[in-house]
């Protein structure tokens, strides 16, 4: 085994030990195939009011422009599939990814540990850790590194565990052994396209972000347009529909990250509880949660939108 192979194996073994579902590695280089797709997506205004998607076009497509001297993109998946979901059938719904502690905090800690491990066990490397926090095309890198394929709903998925996981990266200046992409297993299935209540999946593999319930309930700062009233199927924060109907998610397995467990009251709150939620209860239930992104006023707006 040469040193590149040894380093690669050490990193992948440590990633598993830290609780990541899987780890795949690609050469840090310009994402040629993605460039015209991202450009078209932006030109078609599929980012809606997510201004940040317009920034750093070149860096988003080329990690060597983001982290100078970088050689490798190490992609990591972290499972968030819960063992239990909201119990009340009429309660407004929260996406499973936001049940527990904000994933940015949880993953950043693990990435720091992995970077320290590399520095201690392999040698000093220059690198940065990313989790949804910078202009990086997370899904494209994970797919390139063989961690799954990008499905027709535009999320990364695998035959073994479906798609309920986060994607993060370490971009470092160490050469490693690179992985190959896996094949697409969507076949003739159209379950996600058929189920999307706002027709946000414009065509297979392309999601119009500006029409997605996740965008309306989390990203949109203004009022939610009347035109989508009655189409949210009770989702008040994010939306899991296209993933819930995906046949590969029958193979999702519960996570084992205690920090992702919800506050004990969250799963049993009734429709009435949500409609009467106060700022104090919000702060208690969502103490360190990603739901804080929409703030109390945002969640209130979403609940009101479902009610009217
Ligand atoms: C902006 C954003 C959103 C926007 C826009 C969604 C989108 N599809 O882009 C909104 C707010 C709607 C959103 C919603 C959600 N998001 Co989001 N989001 C992002 C973010 C910040 C950037 C994504 C991006 O670059 N979009 C730009 C467009 C151009 O990229 P794209 O959709 O991936 O488009 C690609 C494909 O269309 C493909 N393509 C185009 N044509 C063709 C043709 C063929 C044949 C093929 C194969 C591919 C292909 O090429 C494009 C470029 O790579 C990432 C984090 C990150 N930094 O990457 C998280 C991220 C994608 N989101 C994530 C999650 C979990 C969600 C939600 C599930 C949350 C929820 N439950 O509410 C939903 C899912 C909605 C959906 N079906 O996509 C995870 C996905 C994990 C996974 N398993 O894939 C990410 C990676 C965050 C993370 N780090 O974990 N999100
Ligand atoms: S998350 Fe919901 S609204 Fe967005 S594309 Fe999937 S099914 Fe459609
Ligand atoms: S629901 Fe079907 S088409 Fe959509 S991502 Fe899953 S397998 Fe692919």
Image: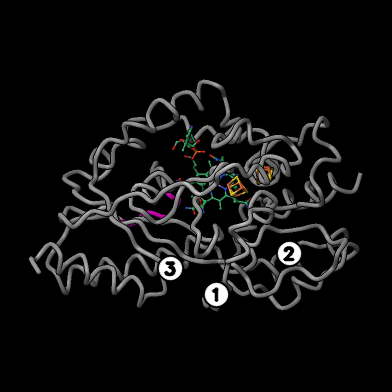
SS of the residue under disc 1: helix
Residue at 49%, 36% in the rendered image: 52
Quick check: 179 left or right of 159?
left
Which residue in the protein does label 1 denote? 259
Q: In this view, does 80 lie above or below 236?
A: below
For marks 2 and 3, give the one nearer the viewer: 3
Depth check: give the residue in front, 174 or 23: 23
SS of the residue under disc 3: loop
Counting residues from the start of the chain, the first of labels 2 and 3 encountered is 3
For marks 3 and 1, give the one nearer the viewer: 3
Q: Do the residues labelled 2 and 3 touch (CB within 8 Å)?
A: no
Residue at 66%, 48% in the rendered image: 242
Which residue in the protein does label 3 denote? 21
Q: Are marks 3 and 1 in contact (CB under 8 Å)?
A: no
Quick check: 119 left or right of 185?
left
What is the quadrant of the C terminus in the image?
A: top right
Magenta segment boundaries in residue numbering: 129-133
* Residue 179 percent across, percent down from the top left: 27, 54
Residue located farthest toward the left when viewing the structure as drawn: 2
Quick check: 182 left or right of 118?
right
- Ligand 2, image quadrant it occupies: top right
Which residue in the protein does label 2 denote? 282
């Amino acid at each position: 085994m040469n040193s590149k192979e040894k380093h690669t194996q050490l990193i992948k073994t440590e990633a598993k030990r830290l609780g990541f579902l899987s780890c795949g590695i690609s050469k840090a280089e310009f994402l040629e195939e993605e460039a015209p797709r991202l450009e078209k997506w932006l030109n078609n205004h599929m980012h809606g009011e997510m201004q940040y998607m317009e920034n750093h076009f070149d860096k988003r497509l080329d990690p060597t422009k983001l982290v100078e001297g970088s050689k490798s993109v190490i992609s990591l998946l972290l499972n968030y599939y819960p063992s239990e979901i909201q119990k009340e059938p009429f309660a407004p719904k929260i996406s499973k990814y936001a049940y527990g502690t904000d994933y940015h905090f949880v993953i950043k800690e693990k990435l720091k540990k992995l970077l320290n491990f590399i520095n201690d066990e392999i040698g000093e490397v220059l690198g940065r850790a990313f989790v949804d926090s910078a202009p990086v095309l997370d899904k494209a890198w994970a797919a390139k590194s063989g961690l799954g394929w990008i499905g027709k709903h535009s999320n990364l998925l695998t035959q073994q565990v479906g798609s309920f996981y986060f994607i993060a990266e370490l971009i470092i200046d160490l050469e490693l052994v690179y992985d190959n992409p896996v094949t697409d297993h969507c076949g003739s299935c159209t379950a996600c396209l058929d189920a999307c209540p706002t027709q946000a999946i414009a065509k297979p593999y392309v999601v119009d972000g500006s029409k997605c319930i996740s965008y309306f309930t989390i990203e949109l700062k203004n009022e939610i347009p009347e035109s989508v009233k009655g189409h949210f199927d009770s989702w008040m924060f994010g939306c899991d529909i296209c993933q819930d109907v995906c046949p590969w998610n029958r193979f999702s397995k519960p996570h084992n990250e205690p920090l992702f467990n919800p506050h004990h009251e969250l799963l049993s709150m009734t429709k009435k509880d949500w409609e009467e939620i106060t700022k104090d209860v919000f702060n208690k239930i969502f103490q360190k949660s990603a739901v804080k992104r929409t703030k109390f006023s945002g969640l209130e707006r979403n609940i009101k939108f479902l009610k009217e």
